[in-house]
Image: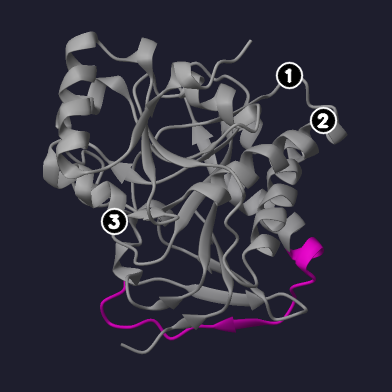
Amino acid sequence: MTPVVDIPVLIIVSELDQAGMNMLVTLRELLRASNSVELTAPESWEEGRYTLEISEDNSVGILKISTSHIRVDYMRGYLRTNLVIFASKHKSESGRKTLLAHPLGNWGEDTIGSGKSHSVGIAPAYALFRAYHSIKEHQTDAGLTEYWVGLEVSHHGPTELDVPAIFMETGGSEEEWNDLRATEVVARAIVDVAREYVGEEPRGNLPAFVGIGGGHYAPAFIKRVDAKMLMVGHMVPKYHSDKLDEDFLKRIVERSVPSGISFLLDRKGLKGSERTRLIELIEKLGYDYKLTTEFPTK
């Protein structure tokens, strides 16, 4: 299969996503991307417009698409890149002002036509670590104290891409999607992460984990990422931990970067019986695990 896009790092922006389109303005400026090429999409791709812009140093591409960016599983096999970063909006019913990053996956049934059910994308722990800290740095510089910076558990698609991918977002309502201060913060953080993946794959010098337990916004894992104790890739909330069986645990490890990743169980974010069940499964499969209490925070 011949790649349609071959570049060290690829940023994908959908015309259907207002926050992403606002980020695009800053991304173009920072990467000095100007010349654009209309791609000829393979027949297997959803019908639409696919426009590629390349950074001045030819290391980062910006792929603007007219289709939905959470439904691009059809790009599997056509992207040759170290990392895909989706510039996106975040939508929440509470409307909380947020700046976020998250990996991709459907722990249960796919209910929105995004990725496959019971499937996960390739989660790069270092990219998420770098995204979180870079967003915080730029948030501080911009004085956006009204925004909360965080991570989310793995959710929605695309789940079938064969390259590592993360979403970086601002939200959670239309007001925030059009707050150009917020979209600039995320865009600057996207470029920071992209620059780290231009050369050899960065590893970081911290232990990397798959996190299990807690809620959607992964408070126990964020605390430890914030304190620079560890990195997390895929994160499974407590309300989906019952979906984890031997095959799914193996698949999560296979779809995690770096290789040899361990499991981190949120001791307070899992019922005792469920924690015991998971430990037995993890040990049976020969994987390592730790509890969050082994990384005490204030």
The foreground one among 296 and 93 is: 296
Q: CA distance from mark 1 to mark 2?
A: 11 Å
252 versus 58 height, above or below: above
Which of discs 2 and 3 lies nearer the camera? The answer is 3
Q: CA distance from mark 2 to mark 3?
A: 36 Å
Name the quarter where the C terminus is drawn. top right
Regarding mark 2 in the picture, which secondary structure is present there?
A: helix
**Label 3 amino acid?**
Glu
Regarding mark 3 in the picture, which secondary structure is present there?
A: helix
Q: CA distance from mark 1 to mark 3?
A: 38 Å
The foreground one among 91 and 124 is: 124
Q: Is residue 163 left or right of residue 145?
A: left
278 versus 124 height, above or below: above
254 versus 65 height, above or below: above
Question: Label 3, on which residue?
Answer: 254
Q: Position of residue 247 (x, y in %)?
A: 13, 46
**Label 2 amino acid?**
Thr
Q: Position of residue 231 (x, y in %)?
A: 53, 39
Question: Label 1, on which residue?
Answer: 146
